[in-house]
Amino acid sequence: MLFPDYRPRRLRKNERLRSMIRETTLSVDDFIYPLFVTHGKGVKKPIQAMPGISQLSTDLLIGEIKEINNLGIPAVLLFGIPEKKDERGSEAYAKEGIIQRAIREIKNNVPEIIVITDVCLCEYTSHGHCGIIKDGDVDNDSTLELLARMALSHVEAGADMVAPSDMMDGRVAEIREYLDGNGYENIPIMSYAAKYASSFYGPFREAAGSSPQFGDRKSYQMDPANSNEAIREVSLDVEEGADIIMVKPAIAYLDIISRIKEEFDLPVAAYNVSGEYAMVKAADKLGFFDGEKVMMECLLSIKRAGADLIVTYFAKEAARILGGKR
C-alpha cells in the first residue's frame, strides 16, 4: 500500500490519536531508584557530577525513601559507603555494615518498598576492585564465597532481592546455593548479566568511592565491542538461577537489550548509568536541549528496546511527570 492510498500522517494529527496507537509506554512501575548510603547522622553529601544525587546517612535516607514511595516508585537499589575499607571488603558482609543497617531502617519505616541490594566488593575494598587480589589480579574463585556471604547478610537484614554486579564467573550459582541452603530459596536474584567495561561509570565511582587503585576492570567486565559474548554471559546466569537479567549501561547498549529480550524468556532490567544521567544534566544546564524532554526520550528508548525494568537516577523526576506531580 503506497502513497497516496496510504498516508501514515493520518494517525499523527493530534496527541489523543497518537496516544491511542502508541506502541511503547513508560510507567512508574518500571523504575528502580539507586541510592548511596553512608555512615553518620545528618549527612547529605552531593555528588558533583550528578546534580540532585547525594550520599545520605541512614536518618536522612528514610525521608528519601518515603518520598520515593509516595511517588509510586516500587523499588530502590542500595549502594553502601563503608566507614573503613580493607583488602577483603569486610564491611560488605558485616552484620552492622552500612547496607545491613540501612535495610533494617527502611523495613522498619517503609516496609512496603522493595529493597534491592548491590552485591559487589568494590566499594568496600581498599584496592577498589570487585574481589580478592592475588598476584596482582582479581581471584575469581576465592571471591565467590565473600559475595555469597554478602548476599546472605543483606537478606538476613531484610532485603527483598539481591543484585550481584561483580561479573565474577559462577557467582549467581554460588549465591543461589548459599541463599537456598540458609532457607531463602524465595529471594530473587537480579544479575548484572551483561555488564560492560564502560567509560560511562565515571560519576558513579565518585558517588560510591569505588575507583580501582591500580589497573582497570577489563579482565572481568565485558568488552564494549562484543554482542555475542553478552548472550553467552546471560545464558550462564540463567542456567545458574538468575530471576532477572540486567544490561549495564543502557542507552549505549540498546542493541544488547533488544537481543537479550528476544532470546530469553525472563524479565530484563537495564541500568541507565551515572554517565548517561550526567550528560543529560550537563547539556540541559548549558542550554543545549530541553533536559526533561531528553530524559523522557532516553527512558522511552530503553523501554522500547525491551527492558521491563529501568534502574535510573531519573526515577523521581520521571515519576513526577508520569504522575502529573511537579
Image: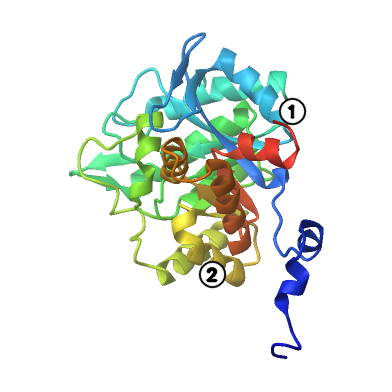
Label 1: state its secondary structure.
helix
Label 2 Cα neighbours within 10 Å, binned few <14 / some 14-19 / many ≥20:
some
At 58% from the left edge and 58% from the top edge, which residue is drawn? Answer: 301
The residue beneath circle 2 is 259
* Image side of residue 46 versus residue 206, left or right: right
Which numbered tag is attached to residue 70? 1
Quadrant of the drawing holding the C terminus:
top right
Q: Nearer the viewer, residue 306 or 324?
A: 324
Q: Is residue 314 above or below residue 10?
A: above
- Tag 2–tag 1 contact (CB < 8 Å): no
Instruction: From the top left corner, tell me how far across and down residue 170 is, in percent.
Output: 44, 54
> Tell me, what colour scheme is on the image?
rainbow
Amino acid carrying mark 2 in the image = Arg
Residue positioned most to the bottom: 1
At 69% from the left edge and 35% from the top edge, which residue is drawn? Answer: 320
Instruction: From the top left corner, tell me how far across and down residue 59 is, in percent.
Output: 58, 13
* Image side of residue 111 versus residue 99, left or right: right
At 72% from the left edge and 91% from the top edge, which residue is drawn? Answer: 1
Residue positioned most to the front: 4
